Image: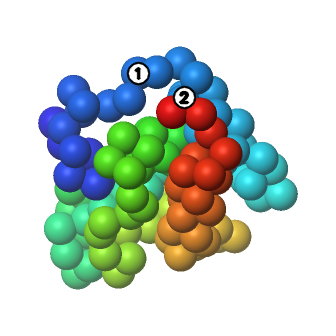
């Protein structure tokens, strides 16, 4: 199974400290939205007409994958959205206050903080 960012699931970062830092950073940013990074999902579809789901990941896992690769998101915003449930593109599960672009900015900020403040 592949993830949203093209890295294999086997290449996921398993470093406990990184998991803790990514979760802490993202949850601090998400607190104002009343959600946490394990219960928020980025879902991508094959096309925007039929909404056939191609992939879905928790925001926490997306953050870990970005950290593993050393750069932010690498997919199209038009076929990707933020949901409170995984593996769906149904409007009833779409997070209304947090857009894909908000997530993209948040992950970019996380990468900057990781680069300059987190030990490697």
Q: Is residue 93 visible?
A: no
Residue 19 in view (yes/no):
yes
**Residue 14 image label:** 1
Give the image location of residue 43, x and y in percent: 37, 57
The local crowd at label 2, few if under 14, some if 14 to 19, many if 20 or more residues have their Cα within 10 Å, is some
Residue where numbered disc 2 is placed: 19
Residue under the image location 26 percent in, 79 percent down: 48
Q: Residue at x 31, y 66 (%)?
A: 74
Q: Which quadrant holds residue 42?
A: bottom left
Q: Where is residue 15 in the image (x, y as percent from the top left)?
A: 46, 21
> Disc 1 or 2, which lies upstream in sequence?
1
- Residue extending furthest toward the right: 32
Q: Do the residues labelled 1 and 2 touch (CB within 8 Å)?
A: yes
Q: What SS does tag 1 mark?
A: loop
In front of the other: 54 or 51? 54
Quarter of the view holding residue 9? top left
Residue at 54 percent across and 64 percent down: it is 108
Above or below for 95 versus 41: below
Q: In this view, does 10 lie to the left or right of 40?
A: left
Q: Where is residue 39 in the image (x, y as percent from the top left)?
A: 58, 40
Q: Please tell me which residue lies in front, 86 or 110.
A: 110
Q: What element carries label 2?
A: helix
Report the label total: 2
Q: Is residue 55 left or right of residue 106?
A: left
| Percent x, y of residue 61 | 44, 39
Q: Foreground: 111 or 8?
A: 111
Quarter of the picture holding the N terminus:
top left
Mark 1 Cα-neighbour bin, 10 Å: few <14, some 14–19, many ≥20: few
Marks 1 and 2, Cα distance to the nearest angstrom?
7 Å
- In the picture shown, does residue 47 fall above or below 82? below
Looking at the rendered structure, which numbered label has been put on residue 41? none
């Amino acid at each position: 199974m592949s993830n949203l960012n093209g890295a294999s699931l086997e290449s996921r970062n398993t470093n406990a400290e990184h998991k803790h830092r990514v979760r802490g950073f993202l949850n601090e940013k998400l607190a104002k939205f009343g959600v946490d990074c394990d219960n928020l999902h980025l879902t991508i579809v094959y096309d925007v007409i039929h909404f056939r789901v191609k992939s879905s990941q928790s925001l926490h896992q997306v953050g870990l994958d970005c950290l593993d690769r050393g750069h932010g998101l690498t997919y199209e915003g038009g076929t990707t959205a933020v949901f409170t449930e995984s593996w769906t593109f149904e409007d009833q599960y779409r997070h209304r206050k947090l857009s894909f672009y908000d997530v993209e900015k948040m992950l970019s900020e996380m990468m900057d903080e990781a680069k300059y403040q987190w030990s490697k």
